[in-house]
Amino acid sequence: MKIDLLRKLPEHMDTLVLLLDSKSKVDDIDHLPTHFKESIEAYVKKEEFKPEYGKMKSFQTVFKKHVSNIILCGAGVAANLTADKLRRLFADITRSAIRLKASNVYLFPSFAPPIGDTQYGHVLAEAALMTEYKFTKYLSQEKPHAIGSLHLALNVKSTRYINRGIIEGRLYAEVTNLARNLVNEPANVIYPETLAEAAKKAALKYGFSIDVYPMDRIRRLKMEAYLAVGKGSKAEPKLIVMRHMGNPDAKNKTIGLIGKGLTYDSGGYCLKPPQSMLNMKNDMAGSAAVIGAMCAAATLKLKVNIVAVVAACENMISGEAYHTGDLLRTMSGKTIEVINTDAEGRLTLVDAIHYAITKEKVDKILDIATLTGAAVGALGTEITPVVTNDDAWLAKLEAASEFTGEAIWRLPAHESYNELIKSQIADLKNTGGPFAGTITAALFIREFVGNKPWIHLDIAGTALRDKESGMYSVGATGVGVRLITQLLREMA
């Protein structure tokens, strides 16, 4: 979809979207062609349309044998519009235009941008391109309709900042949709080797460096916990290490991003029920998020050093698979008693974190993972739980959340819960029982970060949608890509 800025509307339009605030009167709107104004006035009067926030109506009009779609969208009180409310409006407008099979859409707001011009352009492009996304790669029938172009008609003194925002918003959407594609692929297409190949292609396209370590290198690193998870699968684990050194002269300023890379999770010998297994091709959403964020960071040439690590593998059943009761020695030397083979993600994450700290010398850690079903029970599918040991870094993440609209909520890392992950025969056990599962999983990971500032994002609830809503179609959301990208910009 092409997105650009116009100063004046043409006489003939395929689809006109009029965005009205509560104070707007159609007959007072300048720069609207007379024939459109007359048609809209008549419709508004007949239907008693009131521009309440989110209210939308569409109809058709004819002028000189040209048929045009008209979409009326209510914005409510313009002064009350936040970036996130605008994002939702633009998503609804895009979806409505797709339903009308519009080719060229002209968006005409009746009021000045209520947020900064750059952010306004950003939100528009991001919402339009993310809403248009659908995973249709394997459809043999007719593909869903795609909008050819979206023209924003806005009378501003300078187009510079809105155009800058459009470029940035397009990038955020592009790398998020890249992550969505990876997550939506089935497990017979994306497995450790092909995930590594996809990361290599992204590195070549967007301009960051990458190393992929095979089994022998992983063994030499003594990443026993990670390797144990992957033992049951014929698909060999791959350790993917991505780097963007935007400020090579800076010391003690490297950020580590750790993404869970379970390309399929059967649960191992603690086998999941069939319905729970269905979406386990998506258990690598954390890895997709860090790959997407690396693409954005490299494109934006952020002056910050970033190392992203993905310990990719599958959790399967075979005669080689690890068992409940096994004792594993991690790369750090700490030992773990395996209580549940379906609590595997944290085993891969802690070895990846220790690698990032000791071998890549990262100074801050952010891990992102579809880790616990408890996260869904706690906060549902709209809000990502966060556990952290650093208030200052959390404040930057909260600012990034506010900018991107990716909602987060801090959970308490109460010290008393540490007792729940202690083992009688090892340093730790890999589950903490039936209660506070998201917190105990995070506390398990915290045991391996030392004194480094650390943020943990559990995206088990927010990585997928089972129905269309806002900018999201059914399937992967790409959650974390925009949030982490914006956090990195806050850190640069």
Image (spheres, helix red, strand yellow):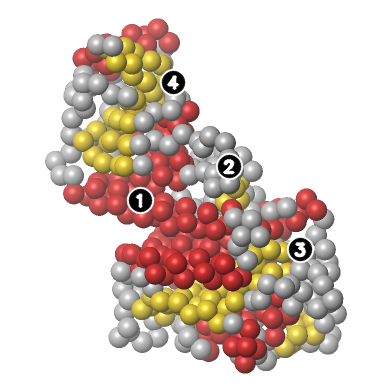
Which residue extends farthest left? 157
Q: CA distance from mark 2 to mark 1?
A: 25 Å
Q: Quarter-wise, where is residue 151 in the image?
A: top left
Q: CA distance from mark 1 to mark 4?
A: 27 Å
Mark 2 and mark 3 residues within 8 Å of each other at the beta carbon: no
Q: Name the residue rendered at 64%, 76% in the picture.
A: 237
Q: CA distance from mark 2 to mark 3?
A: 26 Å
Mark positioned earlier in the residue sequence (1 or 4): 4
The quadrant of the image that shows the C terminus is: bottom left
Q: Which residue is mark 2?
A: 139
> Marks 4 and 3, Cα distance to the nearest angstrom?
46 Å
- Location of residue 311 in the rendering, given as x and y in whole percent from the top left corner: 60, 75
Q: Are marks 1 and 4 in contact (CB under 8 Å)?
A: no
Kindly identify which residue carries mark 3. Answer: 266
Residue 57's disc is: 4
Number of marks in picture: 4
Q: Which residue is mark 1?
A: 170
Can you give x and y, in whole percent of width and height, for residue 476 in the image?
57, 51
C-alpha distance separating marks 4 and 2: 31 Å
Q: Is residue 450 above or below residue 70?
A: below
Q: Amino acid at mark 2?
A: Leu
